[in-house]
Image (cartoon, helix red, strand yellow):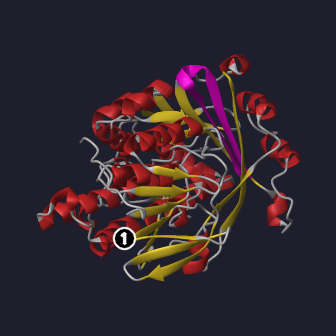
Amino acid sequence: MKPATPSTGDQPDVLIIGGGIGGLSSAFALARQGLRVRVLERAKEFGEVGAGIQIAPNCTRILHEYGLLDEAKDLGVLPENMVMRDAVDARELTRLDLRDLERRYGFPYMVIHRSDLHGIFLRACRRAGVELVTDKTVTGYEHTEGGALVRLEDGTSESAPLVVAADGLHSVARRQLVGDDVVSSDYVAYRAAVPIEKVRDNGIAEKDVTVYVGPRCHFVQYALRGGDMFNQVAVFESPKALAGRDDWGTPDELDAAFAPTCDTVRKGIPLMWRDRWWQMLDRNPVATWVHGRIALLGDAAHPPLQYMAQGAIMAIEDGWVLARHVARLRAESGAGAAAVPDWDAALAAYEAVRVEHCRRVVETARAWGELWHLDGTERLQRNAIMAERDTYDYGFTDWVYGPTALTPDEEPAMFTPIPLASADLRTATGAASADLGAGAGTASAAGPVAGGAR
């Protein structure tokens, strides 16, 4: 689809708060519908922090529709397998053949540097005529006649028929409109992206995404930027957090958490960035994302823990769904792309389908985190279940990697969890562990399939 020409006028059709991946991807999606879109970013320039990010077929499908997939392929890596290993003895637990995964879903599984994906959408927005404004801090939201208004730190305000709050985990809009707080998992993530030469002697798998799971910790590895860089993520439960301390997740805890792990993991730990770490936080799901003409999107609406590697993907899907409903309603009205969007109907359709899907992802991510980190008998039960999984079993991924639903009836059924207690421990070997499930006391076979903390 060729992007339509944005409308003209001083007031935008859509005002998007936040210039991260969710904000920019949504701005591009709406600009393709001929809407005049303005993005307000708090920072002095657009950019992303972090390292690697995994994008599954439900996202690369949208990149293809946007005409951005080839650019992403040039900047990213298409791994061959997703492999889960035991973090203590390094034995393989289960795997997905990602080339076969692409055949099943029609689009590839990709890993890419977070800043590269952000840059793709930033350039796309510029080409589409999105107005990109930096150094604007939003302090509050108000409803207006026929739209909404944002108050800025500099004392000015801006308004539009639709305001989209894509301002992240610590969203000002979420605090004002919902009033809940973030939820701490007591886990922390360290990241690093280093030249591949620094890790080639560490026993790494350059062509795979590898997830090492262990009691109260896990470690993720994969190549980036055409294989020239290597991404690592170390996640562990913080004893200081459990003790109620404020200074939790510090480097001394990192070293202690991974001391009992295998050689490949231990060799990677000294390479982690030690001047920054990410406390793993989410929020409880809420059923209302739309407040008048103010809509929550991305992490402002549904911040997940990282275990399914779907956080940025859900934000991209949000914008795609909203834009598709704008296009649908215009077509049904017979007025075409020049018509003023029926924002209330579009927002209702957006909320009707996205809330339930994202609730599933948020809650499943929490459960997978618990299951990845089990110890003792429950770990062995999980191991036994994973040992029975077929590499080409997609029963646990169809609900998330298939086409993004536009209506509730298109949302696929969830998988059926396998109770841990059903495992035959006579088939479990050693300390191997693996999992993926839908709640404490249950396990399923999709754990490695859904990636890991990014």
Q: Residue at x 73, y 50 (%)?
A: 236
x, y percent for residue 161: 38, 71
Number of numbered discs visible in the structure rendering: 1
Q: In screen coordinates, is 83 left or right of 57?
A: right
x, y percent for residue 59: 40, 44
Residue 259 in which image quadrant: top right
When the figure is inspected, residue 368 is found, relative to residue 363, above or below; the finding is: above
Q: In screen coordinates, is 260 left or right of 68?
A: right
Q: Residue at x 25, y 41 (%)?
A: 2
The answer, for residue 286, to whether it is visible in the render is no
Residue 329 painted magenta:
no
Quadrant where the N terminus is found in the figure: top left
Quadrant where the C terminus is found in the figure: top right
x, y percent for residue 444: 46, 53
The answer, for residue 37, to whether it is visible in the render is yes
Residue 170 in which image quadrant: bottom right
Looking at the image, the residue that sits furthest to the left is 334
Q: Secondary structure at mark 1?
A: helix
Residue 231 painted magenta:
yes
- Judged by its main secondary structure, the magenta piece is strand
Magenta residues, as a range?
A: 216-236
Q: Residue at x 76, y 48 (%)?
A: 277
When the figure is inspected, residue 338 is found, relative to residue 25, above or below; the finding is: below
Residue bearing the label numbered 1: 351
- Given residues 424 and 419, the one toward you in this image is 419
Callout 1, which amino acid? Glu
Residue 200 in which image quadrant: top right
When the figure is inspected, residue 397 is found, relative to residue 36, above or below; the finding is: above
